[in-house]
Image (cartoon, helix red, strand yellow):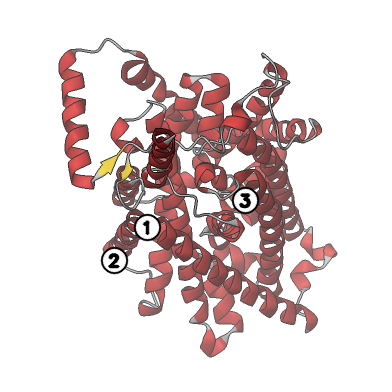
C-alpha cells in the first residue's frame, strides 16, 4: 500500500516537473493573437493595392467586406480541424496528418523559406518607416536606417519570445488594444467627416465610376491584395497546444475575432474615402499618415505612432506563431530536431525562434520586399485551399472520427469554389508572379526526398547533425518537451475502426 502511494506521489511529481509547452493562452489572449496577427501593416498598405485593381471606391469596399466573409468561412473550417486534430502547427499539421509528409513538407518549406519571413520583413519595414517618418518629414527615411531599426525591433521581440510565453502574450494583448484604438480613431474622425457632409467619393453615383474597365482577373488581384491584410486569421491554430481548454476557446476566439476585424477594416476604408479622393489615396505611400495630415492638424503625429504600435504588435504575433510552425515541423522530422526543443526553464522554443529571426533579417538585407506581397498572398491562399480540401477528404476517409465541432459541408465547398476562381484568374492575370510562387513551393520536392525521405544517408551526415544538435542544446539550454496527451487523446481517437 505504501509502495502504491509512493508511486502515485512520484507520478504526480513528475507531471508537475516535466518540461512541456505551457498552457497560458486564455480566451482574451487567443482573440488578441488572431486580431493582433491580422491587424499588422496590411490595413495601412493594402487599401492602395485593392483600389488600384478594383478600379472604383464602391467595388473596393465590396472586396473588403467579401474578404472578411471568405475569412469567416475559412475560419469555421479551421475551427473544426483545430479541435479534431489538436496539434500546434496549423495548416502544416493538418495537411501532414491527412495527406502525408510530402504535401505537408511543401507547405512547411514555402512558409519557412519565404512566406512568413517576407511578411515579417514587410511589417518590420512598415514599423521602421512610420517611426522614422517624423524625423524625415520632407523625404523618405534613409535605406540603412529603416533596415537597421527593423532588425533591432525583430531582435528585441525575438528575445522577449525566448524569455517568456507570458511576456509575449502580454505584449500581444496590450498592442492589440493599442492598434484597435488607432483604427477606432481613424473611424471616428472619418464618421465625423461624413456627418459634416464630406462623403462625395462614397456617393453611389461616384463610388462606382471605374478608372478602368473591371475584369475578373483584376478583381481577383484585388482580393489577393486584401488577403494580405487579412492574413493571420488562421494563426491561433499554430499554438493549439498552448491554449487553455482549446476545444472551447479556439472556436470562441475565431467567432469573436473575424467579424470584429471585418467590421473595423470596412469602416477604416470608409473613413479613408471620407477625407481622400481615390486619386489622393493612390498617390499616397502612407495612407494613414496622409489621412492624419489632412484631418488631425497639429495632432497628425498620432498616426505614425499608432501605425508603429500596430506593426510592433504584428511582428510579435508573427514571431510567436511562426516559431511554433518550425517547432511542429521539427517534431514531425521535417526539420532538424534541434528546432523541436524548448528551454529547460522558460519552456519556449528558442531554436525555432532564432531561425525565424535569422530568416527575417536575411529577407530584410536582400532589398525591396513589397513586390513580394502578391505571390506571398498566392502561396497563402494555396495553402488555405489545400488544408480545407483536406477537411473534405477527412470527412470521407474517417466519417466516424470524433469531431467536437462539425460544420455544414456547404461551408468548405463554398470556400473552395471561391478559392478555385480566385487562383485561376490570378494565374491568368499574373502568370509570372503566381508561377514564381509555385516554383518556390516545388523546390521543396528534392529537399524532401534528400533530407527527409532518404533514410540511409552516410554515417558522417548523422554525426554532423548530432554534433550540431548537441552544441545547439548546450548554447540554448534546450531539451525535447514531453507531450501532454490530456487534450489530444480523446480527440484523435475514433469511435469505430476507420
Q: Mark 1 or 2 closer to N-term? A: 2
Residue drawn at point x = 60 percent, y = 35 percent: 384
In the image, residue 189 sits, relative to residue 455, either above or below, namely below
Q: Left of 467 or right of it: where is 64?
A: right
Instruction: Estimate how packed mark 2 is, as few (under 14), some (14 to 19) or many (20 or more) residues with alpha carbons within 10 Å.
Output: few
- Label 3 belongs to which residue? 226
Residue drawn at point x = 34 percent, y = 55 percent: 158
Instruction: Estimate how packed mark 3 is, as few (under 14), some (14 to 19) or many (20 or more) residues with alpha carbons within 10 Å.
Output: many
Q: Mark 2 or 3 closer to N-term? A: 2
- Label 1 belongs to which residue? 164
Instruction: Give me the C-alpha separation between circle 2 and circle 3.
Output: 29 Å
In the image, residue 144 sits, relative to residue 77, either above or below, namely below
Whether tag 2 and tag 3 are in contact, CB under 8 A, the answer is no
At numbered mark 3, what does the secondary structure look like: helix, strand or loop? helix
Q: Mark 1 or 3 closer to N-term? A: 1
| Picture quarter with the N terminus | top left
Amino acid at each position: 500500500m505504501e509502495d502504491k502511494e509512493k508511486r502515485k506521489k512520484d507520478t504526480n511529481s513528475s507531471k508537475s516537473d516535466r518540461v512541456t509547452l505551457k498552457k497560458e493562452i486564455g480566451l482574451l489572449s487567443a482573440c488578441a493573437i488572431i486580431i493582433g496577427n491580422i491587424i499588422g501593416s496590411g490595413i495601412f498598405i493594402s487599401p492602395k493595392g485593392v483600389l488600384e485593381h478594383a478600379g472604383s471606391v464602391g467595388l473596393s469596399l465590396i472586396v473588403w467586406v467579401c474578404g472578411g466573409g471568405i475569412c469567416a468561412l475559412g475560419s469555421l473550417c479551421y475551427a473544426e480541424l483545430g479541435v479534431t486534430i489538436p496539434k500546434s502547427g496549423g495548416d502544416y499539421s493538418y495537411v501532414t496528418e491527412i495527406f502525408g509528409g510530402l504535401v505537408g513538407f511543401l507547405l512547411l518549406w514555402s512558409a519557412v523559406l519565404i512566406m512568413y519571413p517576407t511578411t515579417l520583413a514587410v511589417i518590420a519595414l512598415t514599423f521602421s518607416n512610420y517611426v522614422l517618418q517624423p524625423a524625415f518629414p520632407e523625404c523618405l527615411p534613409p535605406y540603412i536606417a529603416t533596415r537597421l531599426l527593423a532588425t533591432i525591433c525583430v531582435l528585441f521581440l525575438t528575445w522577449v519570445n525566448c524569455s517568456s510565453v507570458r511576456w509575449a502574450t502580454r505584449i500581444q494583448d496590450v498592442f492589440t488594444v493599442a492598434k484597435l484604438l488607432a483604427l477606432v480613431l481613424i473611424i471616428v474622425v472619418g464618421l465625423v467627416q461624413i456627418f459634416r457632409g464630406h462623403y462625395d467619393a462614397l456617393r453611389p453615383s461616384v463610388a462606382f465610376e471605374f478608372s478602368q474597365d473591371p475584369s475578373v482577373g483584376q478583381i481577383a488581384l484585388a482580393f489577393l491584395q486584401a488577403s494580405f491584410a487579412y492574413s493571420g486569421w488562421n494563426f491561433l491554430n499554430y499554438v493549439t497546444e498552448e491554449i487553455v481548454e482549446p476545444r472551447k476557446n479556439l472556436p470562441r476566439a475565431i467567432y469573436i475575432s473575424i467579424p470584429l476585424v471585418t467590421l473595423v477594416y470596412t469602416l477604416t476604408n470608409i473613413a479613408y474615402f471620407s477625407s481622400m479622393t481615390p486619386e489622393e489615396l493612390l498617390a499616397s505611400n502612407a495612407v494613414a499618415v496622409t489621412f492624419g495630415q489632412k484631418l488631425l492638424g497639429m495632432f497628425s503625429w498620432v498616426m505614425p505612432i499608432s501605425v508603429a504600435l500596430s506593426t510592433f504588435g504584428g511582428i510579435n504575433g508573427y514571431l510567436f506563431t511562426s516559431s511554433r510552425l518550425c517547432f511542429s515541423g521539427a517534431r514531425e522530422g521535417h526539420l532538424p530536431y534541434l528546432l523541436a526543443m524548448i528551454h529547460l526553464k522558460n519552456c519556449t522554443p528558442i531554436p525555432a525562434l532564432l531561425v525565424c529571426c535569422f530568416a527575417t533579417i536575411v529577407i530584410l538585407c536582400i532589398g525591396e520586399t513589397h513586390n513580394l506581397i502578391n505571390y506571398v498572398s498566392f502561396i497563402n491562399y494555396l495553402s488555405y485551399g489545400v488544408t480545407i480540401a483536406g477537411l473534405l477528404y477527412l470527412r470521407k476517409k474517417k466519417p466516424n472520427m470524433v469531431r467536437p465541432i462539425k460544420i455544414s459541408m456547404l461551408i468548405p465547398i463554398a470556400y473552395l469554389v471561391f478559392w478555385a476562381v480566385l487562383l485561376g484568374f490570378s494565374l491568368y492575370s499574373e502568370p509570372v508572379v503566381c508561377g514564381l510562387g509555385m516554383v518556390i513551393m516545388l523546390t521543396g520536392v528534392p529537399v524532401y526526398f534528400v533530407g527527409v525521405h532518404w533514410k540511409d544517408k552516410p554515417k558522417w551526415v548523422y554525426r554532423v547533425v548530432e554534433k550540431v544538435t548537441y552544441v545547439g542544446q548546450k548554447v540554448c539550454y534546450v531539451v525535447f518537451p514531453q507531450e501532454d496527451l490530456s487534450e489530444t487523446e480523446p480527440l484523435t481517437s475514433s469511435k469505430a475502426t476507420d
